[in-house]
Structures are given as C-alpha cells and as structure tokens.
Image (cartoon, rainbow, N blue to C red):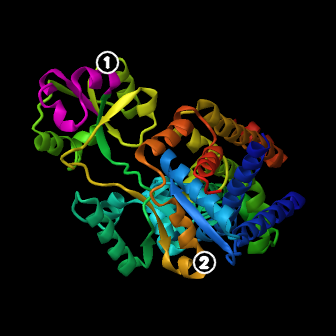
Amino acid sequence: MDGILMLTAEHLVLSAIGVGLALLVGIPLAILITRNQTIAGFTMAVTDVLQTIPSMALLAALMLYLGLGNTTLVVTLMLYSLLPIVRNTYTGITGIDKGLLEAGEGMGMTRWQLLRMVQIPIAFPVILAGIRVAMVTAIGIATIGVLIGAGGLGAPIWRGMQIMDNAMILSGAIPAALIAIACDIGLNRLENAVTPRGLKVSSLARS
Amino acid sequence: MKMKLSKCLAAILVIGLMAGMISGCGGDTGNKVTVGSKNFTENIIVGEILAQLIEAKTDIKVERKLNLGGTLVAWEALKKGDLDLYPDYTGTGLMAILKKEVMHDSDQVYDLVQKEYNELYQIKWLEPFGFNNTYTTAVTREMAEQHNLVKTSDLKPYAKDLIFCAEQEFFNRDDGYDGFVKTYGLSFKDTKAIETNLKYEAVGQNKVDVIDAFTTDGELITYDMVILEDDKAFFPPYFCAPVVRMDTLEKHPELEEVLNLLAGQISDTEMQQLNYQVKEQKQDVAEVAAKFLQEKGLI
C-alpha cells in the first residue's frame, strides 16, 4: 500500500511538472502570438500536430535524445500539454471585448498594465480550463512512462497486463483515475473562484 | 486578483524548480550499473536475476529499468549508455537489430552477432544462459502418448486428421507456418488463427490439436503440453544472453566473470518453470529470482 501511495505521489508530481513546464513555455508564447495572426496560425498548427503523434512514438523518439527516465516523460507531457494551454490562453486573450481594451487604453494604461490588469484576469478562467484539460491528459499519458524507465503508476498497470492480474492493474489504474478526477474537480473549483465577479454578472446579464 | 496571480506564478516557479531537481537526480554514476529488460515476463525475470546476482557478488550498486517498451527502447538505451546491460536473444540481434536474413545454426548466429556488435557498437554478448526461446510446436500429453509423438516429424502420418492453431503472426512470418509445413511435409486438416491466451484454452479443451508455442512459455506447464522437437532445425535460434557495453566491462572488470556464472544455468524447462511461477502462479518476480539463485547456489 505504501508502494502505491509513493507511486501515486510520484505520478502526480511528474504530471504536474510536465504541465507546469508547458505553462512556463505556453502562456508567454500564447501572449506573444496574439500580436501576429500569421505566427499564431503557425504556432497552433505545430501544437496541433504534436498532439496527433502517438504517445509511445513520441516517448521513444525523445528517448533517443534525452535517455531513459523521468526527464523524457516530463518533456513528453509538456509537449502534449502545450496545445490546450496555448490555445486556451490565445482564445481567452483574443476573445476579450475590444471595448474593455479601449477603456483601459483610455485610462492611460501601458501595454504591460493592460495585459496584467485587464487581459490576463479576464482570460484567466479560460486559461485554467486549458490547464485542467492538460492535467487530466498528462495523468493518463504518464501511465506509459514506465516503458521508457520513468516512475509512476504505469509500473503496476503494465506488470498486471503482462501477467493478466486484474488486481494489480486496478491497483495502478484506480489511483490514476482518482487523481485525474481530483485535479479536474479542484481546478474546476478554482476556475469558478477566479472568474471575476463582474464578468459573471455581465455574462448573466447578456444571456 | 493580483494576489492570486502572483501566487499562481510562484506555484509555477516551484514546479519548474522541482523539475530541475528531479532531472538532476540520478547523476551519480560512480559505482553503479543500470540493468534493463524488455516488457515481457521472461525478460523481466532474467533482468531481475542479473540484478540480484550483481548485488550479491560485487559491491556495485544496481539500478533497475525492467519494463522498457520493447527491443527498440532497450537497444537504443544500451547504445546511448543509459543502460549498461540487458538480456537479449541472438535471433533478435540477428534479425531485428542487425537486419540480417534468418539463419538456423545457433553457433553461427551467436558468432555473427558477437562480431558485429563488437565492431559496430562496442557491445559484447556474454555467455548464453542456456535456454532457447524460439517457436516450437506442442500437443497435449494425452495426444503425445497416444500417437507416440516426440519429434515434429512424427506428426506427418497424423496431420491430415489434426487441426493446427496459432496466432495470426505465425501465419504471416517468413519463419512461420508456410515454411514450417513445407520443411516437414505436413498438411493439416484445418488451421485456426487465434489470440495467444485463447490458443492454450482451445487446445486445453481439445478444440484444436497442435499449436505453436514459445519453448519457454509457462502455459505449457499449466496445460500439461508436450513440446515436439524441431528435428529439422527449422525455427531460428533465440538463445538468451546478457548484452553489455564494453566500457562498462572495462570500468567494472569483475562484472563479466560474475555474469558468466549464469552461463548454461537456465534450461528451457527451468525458464518455463520461472515463467510459470510469475505469470501463472502470480508469484513476485524478485522472490522467484532470489529463490532460483539460491537453488543454483549462486547467492
């Protein structure tokens, strides 16, 4: 049981690091590309293509350069997390009512202030929704990390499959499902909590 | 809102730092070897046996990577130096890695893979363990006794009344069904392509008569099957042996002698037993490996 708890913790940490790195790369990238439509289209296409590569193939390919172990898994998870994060951040920011931006400009806000005080706060719930998708996906993909020597809940799942031991499979699959659900619910709550009250009211008023 | 944003940024930063820490771990390669194995039961058992033997006989620390996703992953990791050794099969080396044509003489295959691995990759094949995990044909003990079947050739007079069953792969392979029946001059009443686990079920219930099998399958014990000797040496040899990086052997000169203690120590039937204990009886791999090494007097 201790073993499973350790593996579950490791699984969660590896998934979170992968998604965390995707945030570090993805959010600044998404903000940058809001300024140029051509580059935005290109970037989205690249993240779309990344998403279509089968995960085992991507793991094996990255393994050739990064070697066995957790690093390769984390980079793989980061690449898969880029799509929902970049797309949601981009959509969140470009979807903001032009009137609000003009109001900000009218108040004498600099570009940075506008981003920090208007664009990001308003887009934040949408960005969080992307993080939620990324996190749940990452927890799923991390179960195959064992095939390139990474840690996590993949070990009991794959061993169980080889020896046809359902109890062993479930001892890995159930915790993986539980942390995925927990992340989904937790981030969903956070999403509601950070939606600016004004935005909620205005959307209510509109509908 | 501002507060929440900065908290969020801080969390991201912490996560990033943790990533750095995790990938920074495991940098200590001083007195350590990494033992790998591919993701099927037999390879994992043998990998565990190698790891325990090194731990018992040397003061080298062992890191285990025992569930790697197939030959490609294990092989590339070995070439790269992420693994120091893993158990592989001579036939796999010949055909999957060196991309050579099928060969049937086991010594010739071993010598060839040894030479090419040494020259091309600075990787060495140590002494084989003894078992040859290749294709074979098997029948129930009842049928073997009834018709006095020992060799594959003995099937010839009865084949017209027998149903042959194998995985689809066996029917597709160059070294599979077509070459097999041609070499032995067999014509079966019928053939069935079926999934591996169902194959044993089917023969257990006498729905089919002859199946293909791997010589070391643990299921052969569960279903009390008799292997028919490949008397015309049709199936290519897949002898298992450790493949080790030469620079690892230079760094740890004692390693080669220790690993070669296993030379010829695991027969086909002994490997069947080990597979049976882990796969069919669900025993723990580490315990099965330790028990085996103790029985052999190696630890």
- Answer left or right for B284 relative to B235: right
Give residue B206's mark. 1
Circle 2 Cα neighbour tier, 10 Å, few/some/many (<14 / 14–19 / ≥20):
some
Q: Nearer the viewer, mark 2 or mark 1?
A: 2
Amino acid carrying label 1: it is Asn
Amino acid carrying label 2: it is His
Q: Toward which corner of the image does residue A147 lie, by quadrant?
A: bottom right
Q: Are marks 2 and 1 in contact (CB under 8 Å)?
A: no
| Up-down relation of residue A64 to residue A44 (above or below) | below
Disc nearer the start of the sequence (2/1):
1
> Which x, y percent locates residue A178?
72, 37
| Up-down relation of residue A196 to residue B25 (above or below) | above
- Answer left or right for B170 relative to A16: left
> Which x, y percent locates residue A173?
64, 38
| Up-down relation of residue A32 to residue B208 (above or below) | below
- Residue B196 visible within the image: yes
> Which x, y percent locates residue B145?
28, 23
Chain of the residue under the numbered disc 1 shown in the image: B
**Residue B148 within the segment the image draws in magenta:** yes
Q: Which residues are magenta?
A: B140-167
Q: Pointer 2: what residue?
A: B252
Secondary element under disc 1, as helix, strand or loop, is: loop
- Quadrant of the snapshot with the C terminus of chain B: bottom right
